[in-house]
Protein backbone atom coordinates (compact mmCIF):
# COMPACT_ATOMS: atom_id res chain seq x y z
CA UNK A 1 0.00 0.00 0.00
CA UNK A 2 1.48 3.35 -1.03
CA UNK A 3 0.53 5.07 2.25
CA UNK A 4 2.99 2.84 4.13
CA UNK A 5 5.99 3.49 1.85
CA UNK A 6 9.04 4.52 3.90
CA UNK A 7 11.90 4.70 1.41
CA UNK A 8 12.66 6.51 -1.83
CA UNK A 9 12.69 3.76 -4.50
CA UNK A 10 15.86 3.07 -6.49
CA UNK A 11 15.44 2.50 -10.21
CA UNK A 12 17.77 2.16 -13.20
CA UNK A 13 18.07 5.92 -13.67
CA UNK A 14 18.54 6.81 -9.99
CA UNK A 15 21.86 8.48 -9.17
CA UNK A 16 24.13 6.62 -6.75
CA UNK A 17 24.65 9.81 -4.73
CA UNK A 18 23.09 13.29 -4.53
CA UNK A 19 26.45 15.05 -5.01
CA UNK A 20 26.76 13.94 -8.62
CA UNK A 21 27.75 16.71 -11.02
CA UNK A 22 27.82 14.39 -14.05
CA UNK A 23 24.61 12.34 -13.85
CA UNK A 24 23.33 10.09 -16.59
CA UNK A 25 21.23 11.85 -19.22
CA UNK A 26 18.17 9.83 -18.21
CA UNK A 27 18.63 10.83 -14.55
CA UNK A 28 18.92 14.51 -15.44
CA UNK A 29 15.88 14.27 -17.74
CA UNK A 30 13.63 12.74 -15.08
CA UNK A 31 14.91 15.23 -12.50
CA UNK A 32 13.89 18.14 -14.73
CA UNK A 33 10.63 16.48 -15.78
CA UNK A 34 9.65 15.80 -12.18
CA UNK A 35 10.49 19.34 -11.09
CA UNK A 36 8.50 20.71 -14.04
CA UNK A 37 5.42 18.77 -12.90
CA UNK A 38 6.07 19.85 -9.32
CA UNK A 39 6.21 23.52 -10.33
CA UNK A 40 3.16 23.11 -12.55
CA UNK A 41 1.19 21.79 -9.59
CA UNK A 42 2.35 24.63 -7.34
CA UNK A 43 1.34 27.12 -10.02
CA UNK A 44 -2.06 25.50 -10.55
CA UNK A 45 -2.75 25.73 -6.81
CA UNK A 46 -2.09 29.47 -6.92
CA UNK A 47 -4.19 29.92 -10.07
CA UNK A 48 -7.07 27.94 -8.56
CA UNK A 49 -7.56 30.75 -6.01
CA UNK A 50 -8.70 28.11 -3.52
CA UNK A 51 -5.90 28.88 -1.06
CA UNK A 52 -2.11 29.11 -0.97
CA UNK A 53 0.22 26.29 0.08
CA UNK A 54 1.00 25.93 3.82
CA UNK A 55 4.52 27.33 3.40
CA UNK A 56 3.12 30.39 1.65
CA UNK A 57 0.67 30.85 4.54
CA UNK A 58 3.65 30.69 6.93
CA UNK A 59 5.52 33.30 4.87
CA UNK A 60 2.42 35.52 4.88
CA UNK A 61 2.00 35.16 8.64
CA UNK A 62 5.62 36.08 9.30
CA UNK A 63 5.29 39.02 6.90
CA UNK A 64 2.35 40.37 8.88
CA UNK A 65 4.44 40.30 12.07
CA UNK A 66 7.92 41.22 10.81
CA UNK A 67 7.43 43.45 7.79
CA UNK A 68 9.87 41.95 5.29
CA UNK A 69 8.43 41.13 1.87
CA UNK A 70 6.87 37.70 1.37
CA UNK A 71 9.54 36.91 -1.25
CA UNK A 72 12.42 37.66 1.12
CA UNK A 73 10.74 35.73 3.92
CA UNK A 74 10.25 32.73 1.61
CA UNK A 75 13.98 32.74 0.82
CA UNK A 76 14.87 33.04 4.51
CA UNK A 77 12.55 30.14 5.35
CA UNK A 78 14.27 27.99 2.70
CA UNK A 79 17.69 28.86 4.15
CA UNK A 80 16.47 28.07 7.67
CA UNK A 81 15.11 24.70 6.51
CA UNK A 82 18.46 23.91 4.86
CA UNK A 83 20.16 24.48 8.23
CA UNK A 84 17.76 21.92 9.71
CA UNK A 85 19.29 19.42 7.28
CA UNK A 86 22.57 19.39 9.25
CA UNK A 87 21.46 17.10 12.11
CA UNK A 88 19.49 14.99 9.61
CA UNK A 89 22.55 14.17 7.44
CA UNK A 90 20.90 15.34 4.23
CA UNK A 91 23.11 16.27 1.27
CA UNK A 92 22.29 18.89 -1.40
CA UNK A 93 22.88 18.35 -5.11
CA UNK A 94 22.10 19.90 -8.47
CA UNK A 95 18.46 19.02 -7.83
CA UNK A 96 18.47 21.33 -4.81
CA UNK A 97 19.46 24.25 -7.05
CA UNK A 98 17.24 23.32 -9.99
CA UNK A 99 14.35 22.91 -7.55
CA UNK A 100 14.13 26.64 -7.00
CA UNK A 101 14.80 27.61 -10.62
CA UNK A 102 12.42 25.23 -12.43
CA UNK A 103 9.59 25.42 -9.89
CA UNK A 104 9.75 29.21 -9.87
CA UNK A 105 9.68 29.31 -13.67
CA UNK A 106 6.67 26.98 -13.89
CA UNK A 107 4.76 29.00 -11.30
CA UNK A 108 5.27 32.11 -13.42
CA UNK A 109 4.13 30.23 -16.56
CA UNK A 110 0.94 29.06 -14.83
CA UNK A 111 0.11 32.51 -13.51
CA UNK A 112 0.59 34.00 -16.98
CA UNK A 113 -1.19 31.42 -19.15
CA UNK A 114 -3.68 29.48 -16.98
CA UNK A 115 -6.88 31.39 -16.15
CA UNK A 116 -8.55 31.11 -12.75
CA UNK A 117 -11.78 29.06 -12.97
CA UNK A 118 -14.91 31.16 -12.63
CA UNK A 119 -16.93 28.88 -10.34
CA UNK A 120 -15.99 27.45 -6.95
CA UNK A 121 -16.37 23.77 -7.89
CA UNK A 122 -13.91 24.19 -10.77
CA UNK A 123 -11.50 25.95 -8.43
CA UNK A 124 -11.64 23.02 -6.01
CA UNK A 125 -11.13 20.49 -8.82
CA UNK A 126 -8.11 22.45 -10.05
CA UNK A 127 -6.73 22.52 -6.49
CA UNK A 128 -7.08 18.71 -6.24
CA UNK A 129 -5.36 18.28 -9.61
CA UNK A 130 -2.63 20.63 -8.39
CA UNK A 131 -1.93 18.54 -5.28
CA UNK A 132 -1.81 15.30 -7.28
CA UNK A 133 0.51 16.91 -9.86
CA UNK A 134 2.89 18.11 -7.14
CA UNK A 135 2.89 14.61 -5.64
CA UNK A 136 3.65 12.89 -8.95
CA UNK A 137 6.35 15.42 -9.81
CA UNK A 138 7.86 15.05 -6.36
CA UNK A 139 7.93 11.28 -6.70
CA UNK A 140 9.69 11.43 -10.06
CA UNK A 141 12.40 13.93 -9.13
CA UNK A 142 13.12 12.42 -5.70
CA UNK A 143 13.74 8.98 -7.24
CA UNK A 144 16.47 10.62 -9.37
CA UNK A 145 18.45 11.12 -6.11
CA UNK A 146 20.22 14.28 -7.27
CA UNK A 147 19.38 16.35 -4.22
CA UNK A 148 16.01 17.37 -2.81
CA UNK A 149 14.54 20.81 -2.33
CA UNK A 150 14.57 22.26 1.20
CA UNK A 151 11.13 20.96 2.21
CA UNK A 152 11.53 17.54 0.60
CA UNK A 153 15.00 17.11 2.13
CA UNK A 154 13.54 17.88 5.56
CA UNK A 155 10.82 15.30 4.91
CA UNK A 156 13.33 12.62 3.90
CA UNK A 157 15.62 13.37 6.85
CA UNK A 158 12.79 13.22 9.39
CA UNK A 159 11.50 10.00 7.84
CA UNK A 160 14.91 8.39 8.20
CA UNK A 161 15.15 9.48 11.83
CA UNK A 162 11.62 8.41 12.81
CA UNK A 163 11.09 5.48 10.39
CA UNK A 164 7.51 6.66 9.93
CA UNK A 165 5.78 6.43 6.52
CA UNK A 166 6.64 9.27 4.13
CA UNK A 167 2.97 10.21 3.82
CA UNK A 168 2.67 10.70 7.59
CA UNK A 169 5.90 12.69 7.91
CA UNK A 170 5.01 15.06 5.04
CA UNK A 171 1.46 15.54 6.31
CA UNK A 172 2.79 16.35 9.80
CA UNK A 173 5.20 18.94 8.37
CA UNK A 174 2.60 20.65 6.20
CA UNK A 175 -0.11 20.70 8.87
CA UNK A 176 2.36 22.10 11.43
CA UNK A 177 3.56 24.82 9.05
CA UNK A 178 -0.01 25.71 8.09
CA UNK A 179 -1.05 25.94 11.75
CA UNK A 180 1.86 28.24 12.65
CA UNK A 181 1.15 30.44 9.63
CA UNK A 182 -2.56 30.63 10.49
CA UNK A 183 -1.73 31.50 14.12
CA UNK A 184 0.50 34.35 12.90
CA UNK A 185 -2.32 35.73 10.76
CA UNK A 186 -1.83 33.99 7.41
CA UNK A 187 -4.90 33.23 5.29
CA UNK A 188 -5.93 29.56 5.10
CA UNK A 189 -8.27 28.45 2.30
CA UNK A 190 -9.76 25.13 1.25
CA UNK A 191 -6.86 24.67 -1.17
CA UNK A 192 -4.45 25.11 1.75
CA UNK A 193 -6.23 22.35 3.67
CA UNK A 194 -6.26 20.10 0.59
CA UNK A 195 -2.52 20.60 0.18
CA UNK A 196 -1.68 20.17 3.87
CA UNK A 197 -3.62 16.93 4.28
CA UNK A 198 -3.22 15.62 0.72
CA UNK A 199 0.40 16.27 -0.26
CA UNK A 200 1.79 13.50 1.98
CA UNK A 201 -0.33 10.75 0.40
CA UNK A 202 0.18 12.34 -3.06
CA UNK A 203 3.99 12.22 -2.78
CA UNK A 204 3.80 8.65 -1.45
CA UNK A 205 1.59 7.70 -4.41
CA UNK A 206 4.05 9.34 -6.82
CA UNK A 207 6.97 7.40 -5.32
CA UNK A 208 4.96 4.17 -5.41
CA UNK A 209 3.99 4.59 -9.07
CA UNK A 210 7.51 5.49 -10.19
CA UNK A 211 8.93 2.53 -8.28
CA UNK A 212 6.38 0.14 -9.81
CA UNK A 213 6.67 1.42 -13.39
CA UNK A 214 10.49 1.55 -13.55
CA UNK A 215 11.40 -1.35 -11.25
Image (cartoon, helix red, strand yellow):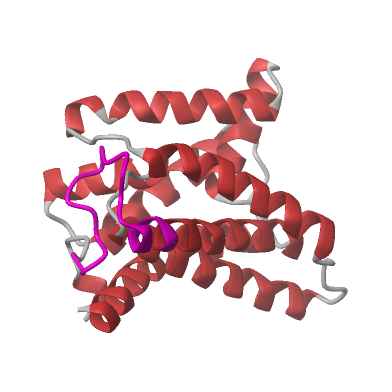
Q: Decide: is 169 above or below 17.
A: below
Indicate the position of residue 58 as horizontal and vertical percent values: 56, 36
Quarter of the figure with residue 70: top right
Q: Is residue 182 visible?
A: no
Specify the principal SS of the magenta part.
Answer: loop
20 within the magenta span: yes
Q: Quadrant of the C terminus?
A: bottom left
**Which residue ends up furthest to the right in the rendered image?**
118
Q: Quadrant of the N terminus?
A: bottom left
In the picture provided, is 45 more to the left or to the right than 26?
A: right
Q: Decide: is 135 above or below 153.
A: below
Read off the magenta span. Answer: 10-29
Rendered residue at 20%/66% (across/down): 9
Indicate the position of residue 159 as horizontal and vertical percent values: 20, 50
Rendered residue at 31%/41% (across/down): 154
Rendered residue at 58%/56% (across/down): 39
Q: Decide: is 205 above or below 56.
A: below
Q: Decide: is 103 above or below 68.
A: below
Indicate the position of residue 49 as horizontal and vertical percent values: 76, 60
User: Residue 184 versus residue 17: which sits nearer the camera?
Assistant: 17
Q: Is residue 61 visible?
A: yes
In the picture provided, is 198 more to the left or to the right than 118?
A: left
27 within the magenta span: yes
User: Residue 187 versus residue 87: which sits nearer the camera?
Assistant: 87
Rendered residue at 31%/44% (across/down): 22
User: Residue 88 versus residue 20: which sits nearer the camera?
Assistant: 20
Amino acid sequence: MFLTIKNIPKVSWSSNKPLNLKPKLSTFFFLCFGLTLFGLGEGLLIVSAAGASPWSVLAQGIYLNVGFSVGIITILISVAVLFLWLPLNQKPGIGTILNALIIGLMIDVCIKFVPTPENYISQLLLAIIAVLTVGLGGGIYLVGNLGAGPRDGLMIGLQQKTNLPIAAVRAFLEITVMSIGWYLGGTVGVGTLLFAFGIGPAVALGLFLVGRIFS
